[in-house]
Amino acid sequence: MVILGPTATGKSSLGVEVAEEFGGEIISADSVQVYRYMDIGTAKPPPGVRRRVPHHLIDVVDPDEGFSAGLFRKLAQEAIADIGRKGKMSLVVGGTGLYIKALISGLIEGVEGNEEIRRRLAEEAKASGGAERLYRRLKEVDPASAEQIHPHDIYRVIRALEIYEMLGLPPSRVRGDHRFSESPYDVLKIGLIKEREELYQGIDRRVDMMVKEGLKEETLRLLSMGYGP
């Protein structure tokens, strides 16, 4: 079972409720909950909840380590196999759509990533006017991808250019040529939605709660440990 949806729609609480009802374990599909020491800011389930229902793929790497959709897929597949051996249900719960898609449908082969290219492009983006130059470059090599990516979404701009440099092909063509495999799993997807105003109010309440629970102190602690922006 996959429970997905935007932030603050109640995915985590529903996942726990279903897991307790049917004897399941949860696999977190959240791109930031994989990082250690970032508990409040990533809205990780509290320890009491995690004692009641086992959670996987939380606190996997340190904040300065990389983590990818490919690694998520590998670890999630291992977790699903382990849960299955116990005779239990696996519940994939989270809002990182790329991770969920990677698990269910696979990844484009050969596009795992190139750290050297990504680092060089990131450094170029930091220079004055660098982000704009990278976006113009993307428009030149792949107008279709540029049309789908906001100029300020520098992470996706860099990723698209990274794919282009690695393969010599526009990312839009790579995606079009890829035939995503049939899922090896029998998946039931549950998508949670809320009205926009209600969703924003929920996000505001969550942020207020994070601040009360010590978000500032958690951030300062991370900085004192040497994990900076």
Image (spheres, helix red, strand yellow):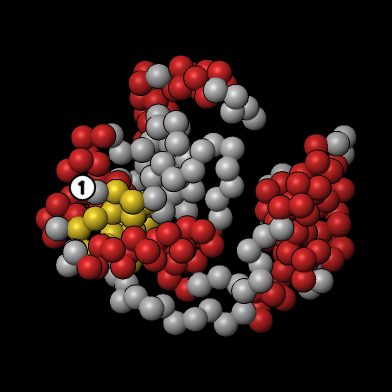
- Is 138 placed left or right of 30 in the picture? right
Q: Secondary structure at mark 1?
A: loop
Q: Which residue occupies 72% across, 68% down?
A: 171
Q: Position of residue 122 (x, y in %)?
A: 76, 44
Residue 60 image position (x, y, % from top left): 44, 45
Q: Is residue 78 above or below residue 31?
A: below
At x 38%, y 45%, the residue is: 58
Which residue is depicted at the point 49% across and 81% down?
A: 181
Q: Amino acid at mark 1?
A: Val
Residue with the mark numbered 1: 53
Whether residue 71 appears in this view of the structure is: yes
| Nearer to the camera, 96 or 110 | 110
Residue in front for this viewpoint, 119 or 31: 119
Q: Is residue 2 left or right of residue 24?
A: right
Whether 152 is drawn above or below 143: the answer is above
Quadrant including the N terminus: bottom left
